[in-house]
């Protein structure tokens, strides 16, 4: 009861420091953010799934399931699940921060909670557990020739931001949505996994974290309502049941639940449990941001904007794919599940505001 009261008081105190909007506010010690949240934004290290991956899964596929060697910086790529440049690459382009992208398309937080097999690598999609371990190995890498770390040449506690955006495959089909979790695990275990990964990054020097909450998956064609862009079946979910309305509402319930957990657990871990001394967290409400694109598309997409239909659509086998007659910049969704490059550009611009400490879609805690 005392912890609940303390958290209530802390949350109330956050409102005192709120921006003049409905979203962003600061926790204790955060102030008004008249200066940039991050002292110097020189490096961006990202973890997640296909919403963030540039080409890490492609490396696994093209190398018989082998991971990139320790100390390897993968090249840029525009051949991504979103049909172009990813949001994190846009952030790098906009700010000059060096991008280290560990995200893997198809990833979940932990394969011991959700197991998703991919035939080309004869195993599960590499998970965020792998991603964080890969980052740690890279950070400790010593080049045999130079006797230095030639990958991370300028990683400091006050010039590096670590972002985490993982949920799409954890909550969706063949996962929690279809009651497919392992070992009697629940959504709470998935949330635990995320903070456990932050533990490992924090122990390895991370101090500035952006937790991107769950996208409004119920607005995507894969999980959308019938008559509002929702598809009956997809190559992502060829055996999708006919009760599409129930599926869409259940997905909204799950995303709302997870985002509520992020909202209250983050200040608890920082301010009450003291789990990350000296660290700062921003919870980026990308759910509300994408919903705003959906509701006000003319502010983000080229006219005429399309927020319900996918730009790129394949048959149930993943073949016979077709693109829309309008350009990709008119579309919120690239395909049935993935935001388009235009959406990624908007997400990136707001991420830059998050790092500056000025985003109305972010809540800051330290």
Image (cartoon, rainbow, N blue to C red):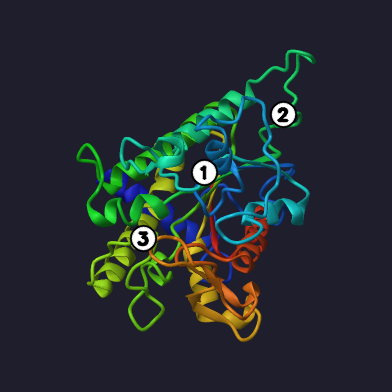
CA–CA distance between discs 3 and 2? 36 Å
Position of 356 compared to 125: left or right? right
Crowding at dot 2, Cα within 10 Å, few <14 / some 14-19 / many 20+, comes out as some
Of 275 and 189, the residue lying toward us: 189
Provide residue 42's location: percent of width, then percent of height.
Answer: 74, 42
Q: Position of residue 360 (x, y in %)?
A: 58, 65
Quadrant in the rendering for residue 178: bottom left
Name, please, the residue furthest toward the bottom.
304
The image position of residue 241, as x and y in percent, is: 24, 66
Give the foreground label among 3 and 2: 2
Q: Earlier in the sequence, mark 1 or mark 3?
A: 1
The alpha-carbon separation of the residues under discs 2 and 1 comes to 19 Å
Q: Is residue 123 left or right of residue 301?
A: left
Query: Mark 3 sits on what residue?
Result: 255
Kindly identify the residue that appears in the image at 55 percent across and 74 percent down: 293
Q: Is residue 167 above or below residue 21?
A: above
Residue 337 location (% of width, % of height): 45, 63
Disc 1: which residue: 104
Q: Earlier in the sequence, mark 2 or mark 1?
A: 1
Q: Secondary structure at mark 3?
A: helix
- Front residue of this view, candidates 19 and 357: 357
Q: Residue at x 57, y 80 (%)?
A: 297
Q: Residues within 10 Å of mark 1 (few under 14, many from 20)?
A: many
Disc ID at residue 129: none
- Per the image, the residue denoted by label 2 is 151
Question: Which is more foreground, mark 2 or mark 1?
Answer: 1
Q: Earlier in the sequence, mark 3 or mark 2?
A: 2
């Amino acid at each position: 009861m005392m912890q609940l009261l303390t958290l209530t008081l802390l949350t109330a105190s956050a409102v005192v420091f709120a921006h003049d909007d409905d979203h962003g506010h600061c926790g204790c010690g955060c102030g008004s953010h008249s200066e940039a949240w991050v002292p110097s934004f020189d490096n961006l290290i990202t973890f997640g799934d296909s919403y963030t991956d540039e080409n890490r899964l492609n490396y696994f596929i093209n190398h018989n399931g082998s991971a990139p060697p320790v100390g390897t910086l993968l090249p840029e790529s525009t051949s991504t699940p979103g049909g172009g440049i990813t949001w994190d690459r846009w952030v790098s382009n906009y700010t000059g921060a060096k991008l280290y992208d560990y995200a893997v398309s198809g990833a979940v937080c932990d394969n011991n909670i959700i197991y998703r097999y991919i035939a080309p690598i004869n195993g599960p999609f590499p998970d965020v557990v792998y991603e964080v371990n890969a980052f740690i190995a890279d950070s400790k890498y010593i080049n045999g020739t130079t006797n230095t770390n030639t990958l991370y040449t300028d990683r400091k506690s006050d010039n590096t931001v670590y972002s985490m955006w993982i949920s799409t495959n954890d909550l969706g089909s063949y996962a929690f949505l279809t009651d497919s979790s392992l070992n009697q695990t629940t959504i709470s275990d998935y949330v635990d996994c995320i903070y456990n990964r932050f533990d490992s990054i924090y122990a390895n020097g991370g101090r500035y974290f952006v937790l991107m909450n769950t996208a409004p998956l119920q607005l995507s064609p894969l999980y959308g309502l019938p008559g509002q862009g929702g598809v009956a079946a997809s190559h992502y979910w060829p055996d999708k049941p006919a009760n599409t309305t129930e599926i869409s509402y259940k997905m909204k319930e799950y995303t709302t639940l997870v985002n509520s957990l992020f909202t209250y657990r983050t200040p608890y871990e920082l301010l009450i449990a003291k789990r990350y001394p000296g660290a700062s967290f921003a919870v980026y409400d990308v759910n509300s941001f994408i919903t705003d694109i959906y509701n006000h598309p003319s502010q983000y997409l080229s006219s005429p904007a399309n927020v319900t239909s996918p730009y790129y659509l394949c048959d149930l086998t993943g073949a016979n794919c077709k693109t829309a007659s309008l350009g990709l910049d008119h579309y919120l969704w690239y395909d049935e599940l993935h935001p388009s490059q235009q959406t990624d550009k908007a997400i990136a611009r707001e991420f830059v505001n998050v790092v500056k400490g000025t985003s109305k879609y972010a809540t800051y805690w330290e």
